[in-house]
Amino acid sequence: MHILVTTDTVGGVWSYTRELVSGLVTRGVRVTLVSFGGVPSRARRSWLAGLSGVQYYPTSFRLEWMQDSEVDISESCAYLLRVIAECKPDLLHLGQYCFGSLDVPMPKVVVAHSDVLSWWREVRGEHPRDAWTECYRGIVARGLAGATVVAAPSRWMMDTIEDLYGTQRLPRVIYNGCTPALFHSPVEKQGIAVSAGRLWDEGKQMSLILQLRSSPFPIHLAGALSLTNVLPDFSVVASNKAAHVNYEGELGEVEVRELMSRAAIYIAPSKYEPFGLSPLEAALSRCVLVVNDIPSFREIWGNTALYFRKDDANSLGEVLEQLQADPKLCHEYAGRALQRALERYTTEQMVDEYLRLYSALLERRVSAA
């Protein structure tokens, strides 16, 4: 089996891609990987060095959710068609909506990792109607209509996509996964909390942590301040004006794992989170999950996380105080989150689901021939 996978290098999709591609290769699948959004650093692509059976094509084409990306979308579609003609894969696993509308004979799985319109609705509470978002809506709608199967990392995300763009012919929910062995650590937990993510992304709502008047735990934040490394309003974090906050900067994956291995608590204040890999990594690191009370977190973590009232910094502070006063509660919820992660969200389970989907689509194609 030969799968062509498209991905981007800007956010957590790159980590998802590492897990997926590594898992596929260990099952004997040949992979052609094409990335967009900027060529990753040598350190970020180092995982590819140890994999045989992967052909990698990095590109710097802008992503469909970026402003002024129309020319890049057209050129990236033409480029991808040339790669497909050269490599002749059996199936396409597409991480960008625009490629779903490509006129090719093989099955196309389009994965709805996130979406600008759903982000805007959850974060800003409105539906933008400007020319750019209408163009974006059309690109996404055409890509979804051209997909053989639309997959999403949570039921919430699939429902949201269908609400915004209409019922999909073959919707499929496949939860993200991580490799548990990457997060095994004998390090004894310290009395610190951590949160990691794109600090420039309003959807991650890291500003909620700064609204805390105080915290019983020092809170360490890790992540990029902006896409261009130019400090936005979140520069308050870098100057540590909030006494309870320590800004760690943009860390590599190994450094983030080390930080999580020491932390007792992981805070997830996101107001938009189709499926956050950072909370999953924290759960596998035996952290207590303290999360914003939004539907996707409820779906993914159930009764294994501690929830604070939606977008309420005071409620977040109350949960942290509760944990500080009750070490047994910390131990209990760290165990709950770890068990949930091991039972439902491993790379092995994710790859199993995708392989079953690929096989079914290829068998259907053979039957129809």
Image (cartoon, grey):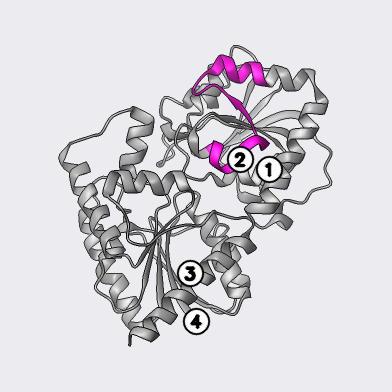
Identity of the amino acid at label 4? Met
Q: Please, is residue 118 above or below residue 269 in the view?
A: below
Q: Is mark 2 on a helix, strand or loop?
A: helix
> Do we see residue 63 in this rendering?
yes
User: What residue appears at the point 20 percent right and 52 percent down from the top-left corner?
Assistant: 138
Give the mark nearer the N terminus: 4 vs 3: 4
Q: In screen coordinates, is 117 left or right of 282? A: left
Give the mark nearer the N terminus: 2 vs 1: 1
Q: Which mark is residue 1?
A: 4
Task: Say whether marks 2 and 1 touch (CB < 8 Å).
Answer: yes
Quarter holding residue 93: bottom left
- Quarter of the picture containing the C terminus is bottom left
Q: Is mark 1 on a helix, strand or loop?
A: helix
User: What residue appears at the point 74 percent right and 41 percent down from the top-left corner?
Assistant: 286
User: What residue appears at the point 55 percent right and 65 percent down from the top-left corner?
Assistant: 353
Identity of the amino acid at label 2? Trp
User: What residue appears at the point 23 percent right and 34 percent down from the top-left corner?
Assistant: 128
Give the mark nearer the N terminus: 2 vs 4: 4
Residue linked to disc 3: 357
Q: Mark 3 Cα within 10 Å, few/some/many (few <14, many 20+)?
A: some
The residues bearing labels 2 and 4 have C-alpha atoms spaced at a distance of 34 Å
Residue linked to disc 2: 301
Residue linked to disc 1: 283
Give the magenta-colored segment's residue range: 297-319
The residues bearing labels 2 and 3 have C-alpha atoms spaced at a distance of 25 Å
Q: Is mark 4 on a helix, strand or loop?
A: loop
